[in-house]
Image: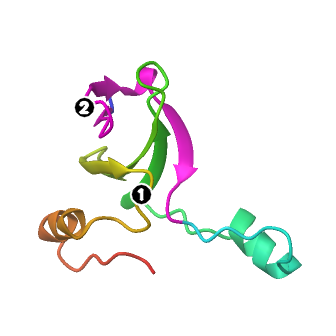
């Protein structure tokens, strides 16, 4: 079972208490974008096994959104952090790199 710690209220919640919100740190394209940019954003994302950054909402708790880094193949959780963060914290990146040598944050 997947357990994430909400960085807002500090509660370790299992996946039944959480609502997934999709991939984090995406460059979104909206009005004024080209069809190709919007298509790339909607449909052309890599879906590889491994480390992903995701949006989650603590639905059965404080109701706040937060971000999490986890491995989709092993369900290992590297950490959670505020949804207002524009990029993963440096200490979280370092933690992932120590466990996954050669991994780098996709830009």
Q: Is residue 27 left or right of residue 97?
A: right
Q: As displayed, is residue 54 above or below residue 33?
A: above
Spatial CA span between label 2 and label 1 = 19 Å
Callout 2: SS? loop
Check disc 1 and report the residue beneath it: 53
Q: Is residue 83 left or right of residue 74?
A: right
Image point (17%, 75%), residue name = 101
What's the image's color scheme?
rainbow
Residue at (29, 40) in percent of width and height: 7
Residue at the spot 85% in from the left edge and 81% down from the top edge: 34
Let me know if residue 12 is in the magenta part.
yes
Front residue of this view, candidates 51 and 7: 7
Please state the horizontal and vertical placement of residue 36, each as a whole percent of the image.
Answer: 82, 80
Q: Is residue 31 left or right of residue 90?
A: right
- Quadrant location of the N terminus in the rendered image: top left
Residue 9, by quadrant, is top left
User: In the drawing, does residue 98 fall left or right of residue 24?
Assistant: left
Residue ID at (23%, 70%): 90
Q: Residues within 10 Å of mark 2 (few under 14, many from 20)?
A: few
Given residues 98 and 8, the one toward you in this image is: 8
Image height check: is 79 above or below 65?
A: below
Secondary element at image label 1 = strand
**Residue 22 in sight in this render:** yes
From this viewpoint, is residue 73 visible? Answer: no
Q: Is residue 41 magenta?
A: no
Residue beneath label 2, please? 10
Span highlighted in magenta in the image: 3-25
Q: Quadrant of residue 61?
A: top left
Picture coordinates of residue 41, whole percent (x, y): 70, 69
Are the two marked residues, 2 and 1, in contact with CB atoms closer than 8 angstroms? Answer: no
Indicate the position of residue 20 as horizontal and vertical percent values.
52, 38
């Amino acid at each position: 079972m997947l357990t994430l710690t909400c960085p807002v209220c500090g509660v370790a919640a299992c996946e039944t208490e959480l609502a997934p919100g999709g991939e984090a740190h995406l460059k979104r394209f909206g009005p004024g974008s080209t069809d190709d940019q919007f298509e790339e954003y909607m449909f052309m994302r890599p879906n590889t096994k491994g480390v992903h950054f995701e949006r989650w909402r603590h639905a059965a708790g404080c109701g706040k959104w937060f971000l999490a880094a986890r491995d989709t193949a092993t369900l290992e959780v590297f950490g959670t952090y505020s949804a207002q963060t524009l990029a993963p914290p440096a200490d979280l990146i370092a933690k992932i790199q120590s466990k996954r040598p050669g991994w780098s944050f996709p830009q």
